[in-house]
Every structure is written in structure tokens, then in C-alpha cells.
Amino acid sequence: MSDCLFCKIRDGQIPAAVTFRDEDVLAFKDISPKAPFHQLVIPIRHLASLATATTEDTALLGKLMLVGARLARESGQAEGGFRVVMNAGADAGQSVLHVHLHVLAGRVLAWPPG
Ligand code: 5GP
Ligand code: ZN
């Protein structure tokens, strides 16, 4: 989508600190980290929200989780623990309408979230 921030990052039109890329997913550091480790994992294909995802997206959504977990593990964050979060919709705090998995670690994370 031409006016989508994360499509622009995917296409290199907006710079980002990319940590992983393959044919399906892209991962990069969050510009405003909420924890010492805070990366976003997005599908290469524009997908607006988990709220509108379908069974066709099952493998892709699963891959976001596994890539997020691997990035946390390879950064030494798996032992202490990490959290994956996907906000869907305005009330949940989704501000970018391109699916993204937050991967957070490096501090004790409160529960429940606000
Ligand atoms: P949401 O609020 O939609 O769940 O998460 C959007 C995330 O994207 C936020 O954590 C925000 O800091 C991050 N973000 C917004 N704009 C940019 C940007 O231009 N570059 C990067 N790397 N992250 C961004
Ligand atoms: Zn997009």
C-alpha cells in the first residue's frame, strides 16, 4: 500500500534498523522502544490487522511468532523472558495499519498491560 508506513520501510523508502529479512517477513528495531529490546516483525505482504486476517494468513502469522522468538533467543533474551504483543484495532493501541508483532524484553514486564 502506497501510504503505509511499514510498506515504506519494507521498500526502503523510510530507513529502519533491520535485523532480519526473508521472502515472508521483515524485522526491525522499534523507533520508540518500550523496553531495552523492542523489535517489530511484519509480513512483507501488506496485511492491515489481525482483526481482518483469514485462514490464508495462518502460516504467515505463525512465522511472525517464530521469527520473533528466534530474534529474542539470538539476542540472549530468551532465558530472562520476552513478550510478543500484537495490537489489533484502535482501543488496543494499533497505530500502524500493517500487521506487526512487538517483541519486548530486557526488563521485567508488568502484567496485565495497561
Ligand atoms: P502499534 O502502536 O501500532 O501497536 O505499534 C506501532 C509501533 O511502530 C510503535 O511501537 C512505534 O514506536 C513504531 N513506529 C512508528 N513509526 C515508526 C518508524 O518510522 N520506524 C520504526 N522503526 N518504528 C516506528
Ligand atoms: Zn503496509
Image (cartoon, helix red, strand yellow):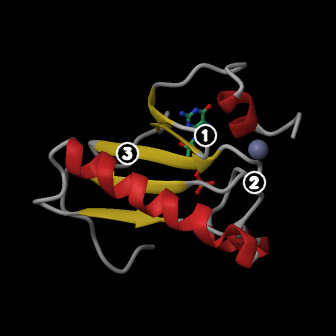
Instruction: Give how far across and how far down residue 85 sits, in percent.
Output: 47, 65
Q: Is mark 3 within 8 Å of ligand 1?
A: yes
Vertical side of 39 occupied by 97: above or below: below
**Mark number, residue 38:** 3
Nearer-N-terminus badge (1/2): 1
Q: Is mark 1 within 8 Å of ligand 2?
A: no
Vertical side of 43 occupied by 29: above or below: above
Mark 2: amino acid: Leu
Vertical side of 31 occupied by 102: above or below: below
Left of 63 or right of it: where is 59?
right
Per the image, the residue denoted by label 2 is 97
Instruction: Give how far across and how far down residue 42 sits, in percent.
Output: 59, 48
Instruction: Give how far across and how far down residue 58 sits, in percent.
Output: 63, 72
Q: Is mark 2 within 8 Å of ligand 2?
A: yes
Location of the N terminus (image quadrant): top right
Q: Are marks 1 and 3 in contact (CB under 8 Å)?
A: no
Mark 1: amino acid: Glu
- Mark 2 nearby-residue class (10 Å; few <14, some 14–19, many ≥20): some
Q: Residue at x 72, y 25 (%)?
A: 11
Give the residue at the far left of this rendering.
Answer: 79
Q: For the residue labelled by badge 2, is the local secondary structure a helix, a strand or a loop?
A: loop
Instruction: Give how far across and how far down residue 99 sits, in percent.
Output: 66, 56
